[in-house]
Amino acid sequence: MEGPHFNAGWRGYGKIPGKYQPYTEKTVWDEPWEGTLTAMVALFTKYGNGFRPPPPRETEPFWGLDAFRWARECMHPRDYMNSNYYALWLDALAALIDNYGAYLGKGVSSQEMINLGVISAAELNRAREIRLKAKYETVPGCGKPNVQGEYASSKYDPKVVRGGIAAIGYRPKFRLGQNVWFIRQQSSGHTREYPYSRGRLGTVVAYYGLAPQVWVNKQLQFTGKYMEGYADIWCRGLQRFYAPLYSVKFYAAELWGIGYTDPRHVVYVDAYEPYISSRYGSYLMNDRDDDK
Amino acid sequence: MNPLPARVNALKDLLISKGVVDQNSINLFVQYYSQTITPMLGAAVVVHAWQDQAFKQALLNPPPSQPFYASILIRQFLTGTTNPKTKKPFLDPANTFGLTLGPEGEYIRVVANGPLNNPETCPDGRRIRLVHNLVVCTVCSCYPQALLGIQPTWYKSQQYRARAIAEPFGVLKEFAEDAGHNIDAYLKSIDELRVWDSNSEVRIFVIPEMPPSWSGLSFEDKLNRVTRNSMVGAEILYA
């Protein structure tokens, strides 16, 4: 979502605080409540990609780090800029509970959180409005959703692609060394294509790909392959879409201009396949992915 | 709004009363984050990579069919190596939540600071011999927690997130100056400064360059000298 978390490259922040913070039991967190909150978030997102998810049950919503990141981005920009890092987490956890609490079946209600002063009604309403707006927006590689907010993709929906996840990640669409443009997009949803890379030219330097999860006796087996979902859809907690992942290298002046950029400075970002295109502007005239 | 600690406690009490979380699990996670996963794990990987070139090269060059094979190698090393301080293996498989290494430790991409084994050439013809890698998460605070523990406050700060990606030379200089070091000669010697924005579930782990004078030190002595900041690329190690 567009907002103040996209502060990469902003000037005038001054010095970085606390560079030599020691790592001891007492100094991992600045305050004890930050540890409590970290633990609660870990417990609450363990059914997402933060911790091992159970074998997919398609009939219920799921949530994880992408949903949590999106929830953090929904804070009012003025509050975000002035906020303690863990204050973002508290608002985000409250928004996650507001969104998904009913599915826990434990009777947690948003009204109780408001009554207890955990979160304001205004904050929850803002997050709800943003989620509603996102429900009708185009997502790269997936087009516009239907009225229920469901996306259809012939490329990234493992229920549609013959061969499922394995087929989606079977071979790279872009080769190593190929120059690619990042598409231009804005989103009310969560995306990991950031403004500083949109429209810019980079070079594919690695194909991380995509592979299906392997479960043995309800234990997820790590295979050394990338097995995570496509963040832009995954953050919504409704559909399990997957897109292969690439690593792309930029010369920093492409991102930050020539004003103060040292020519020895390069930037590596990861790109889900729908973020990049081999032809400049292929997405400008329509929202279809015609980049064959 | 109430002060933050009161709001967190109110939420905790609510979730406990509904049976969503329990105090014991919260305590276990706090203990896990503050005592089980610490930068010592990453430091052990670094020292072993310094002492075993084959291990280092395997971490840096995973097979294309398994781009995150490094996580598997690191698990084998950490579960099979005794921590000289605790006399127990660095990593207990029972402590990984069923993951390979722990939270944010599945998709580890290892990079090394220092001279490249095979120098590269830029499009403009410049030769790349010495590289320095610096890791940032510009939008949140993604970080290889399973190897380094909870992120330090500086890594999560808006200052670092905004600046590291756009003016990394200045950031490295500031880190050195705050510790009383002059890093100008090193900065001049870098042929390519690579900044990694952690914008997927891939987590970048940096092997810093070992000061030559450490070569005679024991595993444990080296372990004690590898700094957390150096495994993010924010500082270099000094003799």
Image (cartoon, coloured by chain):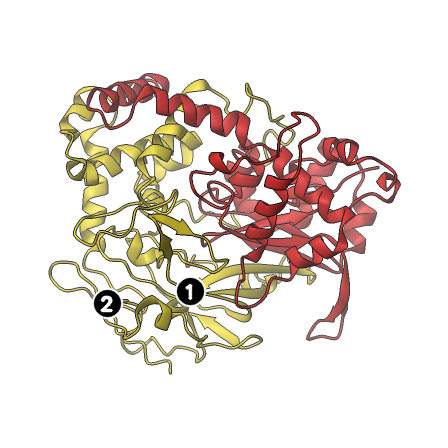
Chain colours: A yellow, B red
x then y, percent, for residue A115? 17, 21
Dot 2: element:
loop
Residues under labels 2 and 1: Cα distance? 15 Å
Q: Position of residue A205 (x, y in %)?
A: 57, 69
Q: Quadrant of residue A39?
A: top left
Q: Examine the rendering and report whether any part of residue A12 can be seen.
A: no
Estimate how packed mark 2 is, as few (under 14), some (14 to 19) or many (20 or more) residues with alpha carbons within 10 Å: some
Q: Mark 2: which amino acid?
A: Lys
Residue A248 located left or right of residue B127: left
Mark 2 or mark 1: name the one nearer the start of the chain. 2
Q: Is A199 in front, or is A13?
A: A199
Q: Is residue A275 left or right of residue B47?
A: left
- Name the chain under label 2: A
Where residue A288 appears, as percent x and y from the top left, is: 28, 76
Q: Residue under circle 2?
A: A159
Give the residue pinned by disc 1: A210
Are dots 2 and 1 on a single chain?
A: yes
**Three-letter amino acid code of the residue under disc 1:** Leu
Mark number displayed over residue A21: none
Residue located at (31% from left, 18% from top) = B9
Number of numbered labels in the structure image: 2
Camera sees residue A253: yes
Observer-nearest residue: A142 or B27? B27
Q: Position of residue A182 (x, y in %)?
A: 44, 68
